[in-house]
Amino acid sequence: MRGDLFALLDPDGTGPATPSKGSGRQGTPARIAAAAKHLASRVASGERAPGVPVVMQCLDELAQLDEGKDAMRAFWALASVRQRLLALGLARARSFPGTFIGDRVLVVPQTRQAQVIRVLPAEERTTWFVATREAFPSTARKSEDVPLPEGRPELDDTALGPPRIDLAEVTFRLFRFGASPTDIRLCMRVVQEPGSFCDVLMTGDGERVAMLSRDVIGIFDGDGKPVLSGRLPVDTDASKGAEITAMALQGDILGLNLRAAKDKVVELALIAVSERKGFPVGLVGDDAQGLLLGPRQAYVMDGVQLVRLPLFGASATEEIKVFSVRPWFAEYPWTAKHLMAWDGKRVWLSNGQKIVIIDEGLDLVRAEIVLPEPIVDLWVTASEVRLVHFDPTTGRVRVALWELARVEG
């Protein structure tokens, strides 16, 4: 419900961190009051579940807005409601709304500086794959190896030693953790030379996982054996600014968000893994940074909106749907990349601090959960959710298993 009120305050879905560009839908007090009354009527009729008392009080105040002769007072009331909603959203939850079943700790065999980028399950969630990233300073070069700019005097103070230029060498690793604590295996290693950094993508479908570096991919089964390795059948000319911005795996289908050049719109393409054949689906947005595949649809995170594309035998009458995401994360600094998961009926969206659960058709938000502690990944099924926490000081990954009896709010 708090997200609904933010949507009333920011009808463009840009949120307070991104001001509206003047589309004609600015939130004047009169328009906000009319929308609030409509939302209140939906709550009264049972179409929309009510929020906590503080949120409902804010809704009542919005519904009673009246510019009248004192428009400034109405805008003050809007500012007051916004501040209370922000404060409520930033309050840390005491516990996750579910039954705690247990957890598992994965000790990453790397230095404490390693960052965890994805943690995904395989084989009935008894096997886990962890992708990490490490950055090391490259070997320093002597002054005579480094050309000095014109007009700069050469250094002759030998006590200082030669100037050092520290460039980062980035290494990505994919580890498999079996059922036994000692069953740890390195499946894939990607080394990027200084100056050639590119994000490595990782995805999975619960049975297999895929790791992609530019156009080179490795797909592994639950035992850590490669199912597919090599170059993808797509054109990714880095010199033109081409890139793969997101990846998703669903059975034998691999989905990719492709940008052919830096000034081009991102396009969704699907590849049959067994046949190594791909085909384009269509354009999905200028800033498509997330991708999720469901049984009959694809979900793309494009800027401040979530887009649903009918696929895989969906009815020809189904339309592309767009869900405004920014109002539901208005209390946090905006990030283009979100964690996305699919439980068979709903989309789970998280910025690491909070989870929003949305119906398959993007018509209704079922739950809004502020997390008691940050997460780096999540995995959901019909009734279970696994929250992944990472402690960089110890280099340990903790996967907490929760059982959910009901997801609604």
Image (cartoon, rainbow, N blue to C red):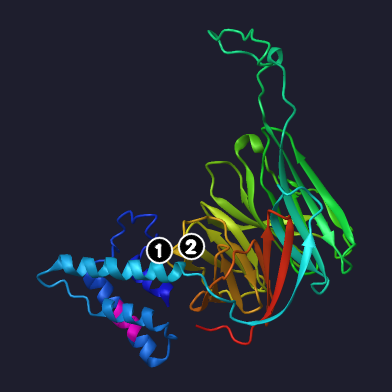
Magenta-drawn stretch contains 38: yes
Is 21 above or below relative to 362? above
Residue 98 falls left or right of residue 317: right
Under tag 1, what secondary structure? Answer: loop
Name the residue rendered at 41%, 74% in the picture.
2
Give the mark nearest the N terminus, 1 or 2.
1
Whether residue 107 sits left or right of residue 164 in the image: it is right
Q: Are marks 1 and 2 in contact (CB under 8 Å)?
A: yes
What segment carries the magenta color? 36-40
Q: Which residue is at a point 37% across and 63% down the rendered structure image?
A: 12
Q: Residue at x 36, y 82 (%)?
A: 56
Residue furthest to the front: 159
Kindly identify which residue carries mark 2: 305
Q: Quadrant of the N terminus?
A: bottom left
Residue 217 appears anywhere in the view:
no
Is residue 62 visible in this depiction of the protein? yes
Q: Which mark is residue 25?
A: none
* Drawn side of residue 306 relative to residue 139, left or right: left
Residue closer to the observer: 223 or 374: 374
SS at badge 2: strand
Residue plotted at (57% across, 7% down): 153
User: Is residue 159 positioned above or below 122 on the image?
Assistant: above
Q: Residue 343: horizontal and vertical position, in percent?
A: 66, 76
Task: Tell me the kind of residue under disc 2.
Answer: Gln
Q: Which amino acid lies under the numbered mark 1 shown in the image of this protein?
A: Gly
Marks 1/2: CA–CA distance: 8 Å
Q: What is the x, y in percent for residue 60?
A: 29, 82
Residue 154, located in which quarter of the rendered image?
A: top right
| Residue 13, label in figure | 1
